[in-house]
Image: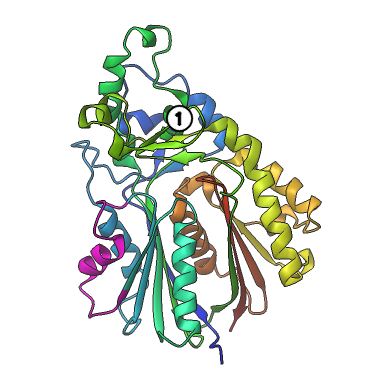
Amino acid sequence: MRTEVFLTRTGAFLPFEPVGNDQIEDVLGLVGGKPSRARRLVLRSNGIVSRHYAIDRATGEPAMNNAQLTARAIQALGDDIGHVDCLATGTSLPDQLMPGHAVMVHGELGWPRLEAISCAGICLAGTAALKHAWLSVRAGDARRAVATGSELASPILLGRNFEAEHEQKVHALETRPEIAFEKDFLRWMLSDGAGAVLLETAPRGPLSLRIDWIELSSAAHELPTCMYAGAEKNPDESLRGWLSYSASEWQTQSIFSVKQDVRLLNDNIVRASAEALHAVIEKHHLRADDIDWFLPHLSSAYFIQPTLDSLARAGLDIPRERWFTNLTTKGNTGSASPYIMLDELFRSGRIKPGQKLLMFIPESGRFSSGFVFMEAVG
């Protein structure tokens, strides 16, 4: 018999004070001593007004690592949550290649022995962690589980990381002073943050969310890589990973920078997500009237209208007034975004018992999609 699973608490952590659009290069630094010409164009399109970076403004150095950031979000759940049997974490950029992120977070927390699971990926990594935690409680393996999504993007976005590449290409850059657009683009899109949720076998407190289902879907069988790090693209769109480059090339080609094929993104993200959406609608008999809150993870405000259009074409025409997103003020925190968004709504008092929530998480890594359906209970 399957156990019902309830999301009973949420937590989030956003480091330091919000950083406005005109302050970004003060925190991240310039590349080649010149302001980016792409910055205003990207910011005008993505609609983000403020975001958070775990960078010490006095020293210009990271003030905490990803594991510490994640632990702070978990601690925001409260110190009275009880013994946790399963910790499932998701992130794009862990602090090290090995060991896994989850055990490092466990070490930061100092909790007793538990199951620790690390989920890799990009925006969908946190949702994959949520699914593992949900299934663990649902199967009866865990009485209580914590799932997290976290991103510490700022250290890899610092201007100094691109100086070696800039110096090597100085002549070509005399007419184009910024780094290649697929790298520069993401310096104005990504930021830091972490979120966590507690899953249990029974409701707790005045409000809990029963998780009815979670669906994950990949379109990698038909689409090439769109967002990546630690690699470069070959002419045939396959990836050449960092292990096949020399240590000097890691710097001169900024191999470890986060890159985005913007053309591929714009051409495919809505269509790839729409196909997954159609499958979910059919499988779970979704109707727009049944959804009181729609929480889409949006990397940019640019995708609001295409998402509205895609929902309408799929027969799930959820009005804009039923949407909830905090992209404008919290920024795009990747796998942490769904958690940070849900935390703000959950704590707002706006969710009422009986209301139903649909979370939508698209990922452009190789075009994956995630959906989480919940019902509020008193």
How many numbered marks have been drawn onto this rendered protein structure? 1
Instruction: Kindly tell me whether residue 300 is visible in this rendering.
Output: yes
Q: Which of 116 and 220 is in front in this view?
A: 220
Give the quarter of the figure containing the N terminus: bottom right
Instruction: Kindly tell me whether residue 49 is visible in this rendering.
Output: no
Question: Residue drawn 23% across and 42% down?
Answer: 56
Q: Position of residue 43 (x, y in %)?
A: 51, 31
Q: Which of 113 and 331 is in front in this view?
A: 113
**Quadrant of the image occupied by residue 57:** top left
Q: Where is residue 322 in the image (x, y as percent from the top left)?
A: 69, 59
**Quadrant of the image occupied by residue 246:** top left
Q: Position of residue 104 (x, y in %)?
A: 24, 63
Question: Residue drawn 27% across and 24% down?
Answer: 252
Q: Is mark 1 on a helix, strand or loop?
A: loop
Q: Going by the image, does 215 lie left or right of 315? A: left
Q: Going by the image, does 270 lie left or right of 53? A: right
Residue 106 included in the magenta stretch of the image: yes
Up-down relation of residue 375 to residue 306 (above or below): below
Q: Which amino acid does label 1 sit on?
A: Asn
- How packed is label 1: few (under 14 Cα within 10 Å), some, or many (20 or more)? few
Q: Nearer the viewer, residue 348 or 310?
A: 310
* Residue numbers of the magenta segment: 94-115
Question: Residue drawn 48% across and 40% down?
Answer: 227
Q: Position of residue 66 (x, y in %)?
A: 29, 54
What residue is pinned by disc 1? Answer: 234
Colour scheme = rainbow
Residue 347 included in the magenta stretch of the image: no
**Quadrant of the image occupied by residue 80:** bottom left
Q: Going by the image, does 75 lie left or right of 176? A: left
Q: Which of 195 and 129 is in front in this view?
A: 129
